[in-house]
Image (cartoon, rainbow, N blue to C red):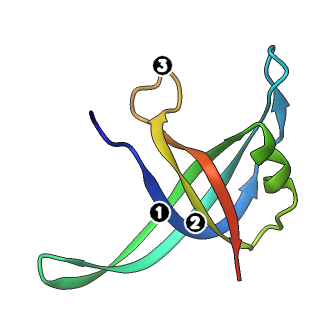
Amino acid sequence: MEQNTLQITGILEKQYPPRVSPAGVAHQDFLLQHRSRQREAGSAREARLGLTVHCAGELVQQLQALQLGDRVLVTGFLALASYRDTEKVVLHAQTLDRQD
């Protein structure tokens, strides 16, 4: 079976407006800015990226308790943003934790 799990830390840069699905489930996205030093081919390099994170259900309440600029640890899985957009990837959060 294939694996699809990502754990990443970063800064909460932007919260997008919350919404509710037709089934009544709360959804909200946010932009996570990540910056770290990684090793590649024996050399150090800076890794920087902005990643859209999708929260659903009770994770939306956790997200709304956070402030812009908070450092967070997100664990989840990667999926396409939509079935029509086959180039944009979104991290679907399964856990969301504020880091001090």
What numbered label is drawn on residue 33? 2
Q: CA distance from mark 1 to mark 2?
A: 6 Å
Q: Is residue 75 above or below residue 79?
A: below
Q: Indicate the secondary structure of the residue bearing disc 2.
A: strand
Q: Quick one: label 2 or label 3, which is nearer the N terminus?
A: 2
Please tell me in which quadrant of the rendered image residue 100 appears: bottom right
Q: Quadrant of the N terminus?
A: top left
Mark 3, residue position = 83
Report the side of 4 relative to 44 (left or right).
right
Labels 3 and 1 touching (C-beta < 8 A): no
Q: Pick out the residue farthest to the front.
A: 1
Residue situated in front as seen by the camera: 1 or 32: 1
- Residue drawn at x 48%, y 75% is 35
Visible residue check, residue 16: no
Q: Indicate the secondary structure of the residue bearing disc 3.
A: loop
Mark 1, residue position = 49
**Residue 70: % across, % down:** 74, 73
Labels 2 and 3 touching (C-beta < 8 A): no
Q: CA distance from mark 3 to mark 1?
A: 23 Å
